[in-house]
Amino acid sequence: MASAVANFFDFTTWPAPIMPTPPDFYLCDRIYGSGIKKQDCKDAGIQLPHGRTDVQYSVGTGMSYMLPLTVEIGTCMMTVEVAGGTGTQFFTTTPQKIRGMAGWVIKQCVRPSGLGGFVTLGIDQFVNYISNPDTSYTNGRYPISTAFITLTVTNKQDRKPSPGDFDPSVALLAAQSTNAAWKNAPVPHNTDTASRVKLSESSRAWIRQSAAMKRGGDMTPYWRAIPLASDDMVYECDDTLGHPAEVDCSQLEYSQLGPDLDTIQVEPGIVRFLTSNTCNVAITATSALVLNWLQIRTALDALLNVCVSHPLNTPQGGRAYYGTQPLLRRSNRIRQQATTGLNALPPGANITVYAQPNESWQSDPVAEQKTCTWQSVLHGGDVASCPKT
């Protein structure tokens, strides 16, 4: 990576924050570092290039303006890099915009809580491209015009691969954008046109892609070829389930789930509860099932990505289940519904994430009775066993 010294810029003005213009967005997450000091980041930001006119940054070559660009001072590491599977060798922007990106992440992530995070610039071309119903995602190839850049603030020990390539929030933005294009497309004679069908399929495909991605991971970039296969997993977000905190849900996944191949028994009238502060998980079933923790973890990861960790929406509770089982009362049907291709859970299994319970998270209404008996179980969960009536 290029260093600040290699770019021959050294100024003494802190970067003023510039708020990203949608669809560009930012995200703060301890995955990208914690304990980062504001002063270290301000000092690092001073090292970024100045200039209010467009500059052509070269990617991976030895020119003066070069990407990736990394500046590290104390607890703070800033990295500017190009994202996208385009193979582009150049990206044009103004140095002042990059400084503004740094200022924004400092203001939103570092100053309030010492967390790392990232912000995008120029992602609108990517959004415009995927919102075209004639765009195909089956070959994983994107034109050079869809490349964008990210500025990431982290610390050295928490350095992660490019979030612009690997963070599931990019695929979720794509799902939201294609869904909006579908909603806004004309519907002649109250029937779907071929274009609307393609956009709907694309939105579901992007949700599948986000479910296969992992924050801080490096295995699945957003631009990997996306199959448009049908599937039966349903993920629903429900505001009436409250607003669990992302940090609490991450702690729950870390501390409450067992080894992947260990199994648990789930039966009608038995509710398996997991909890970590504001984040609660209820595992239920409409028939007797044996589930392993890998199935639960996979479905929970996708549900948290869609409902709790979505960078563009307020965190909210939600449900994951297989197929079209009549799990919910119609009055509680959620505002957003998306399918994924993981098929993590077998038919009859249901997972609900909530900050506060409501009547719709139960697969069996008798589980709401106050006479349930409680017993502790392995891996930190509790079971409520409720008599049937």
Image (cartoon, rainbow, N blue to C red):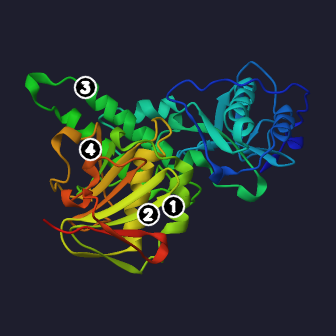
Q: Is residue 359 above or below residue 347?
A: above
Residue 239 percent coordinates (x, y) = 36, 38
- Mark sitting earlier along the chain (4/3): 3
> CB under 8 Å between callouts 1 and 2?
yes
> Can residue 224 be seen from the camera position used here?
no
| Residue for point 79% across, 22% down | 51
Q: Is residue 271 found left or right of 301 in the rendered image?
A: left
Q: Residue 252 has which mark?
A: 1
- Mark sitting earlier along the chain (1/3): 3
Residue furthest out toward the left: 189
* 3D distance between C-alphas at marks 1 and 4: 32 Å
Q: Residue 126 has which mark?
A: none
> Can residue 306 be seen from the camera position used here?
yes
Identify residue for label 4.
Answer: 201
Disc 4 secondary structure class: helix
> CB under 8 Å between callouts 1 and 3?
no
Disc 3 secondary structure class: loop
* 3D distance between C-alphas at marks 2 and 3: 42 Å
Q: Nearer the viewer, mark 1 or mark 4?
A: 1
- Local crowd at mark 1 within 10 Å, few (<14), some, or many (≥20)? many
Q: Amino acid at mark 2?
A: Leu
| Residue for point 32% across, 65% down | 344
Task: Give residue 185's quadrant in the image.
Answer: top left
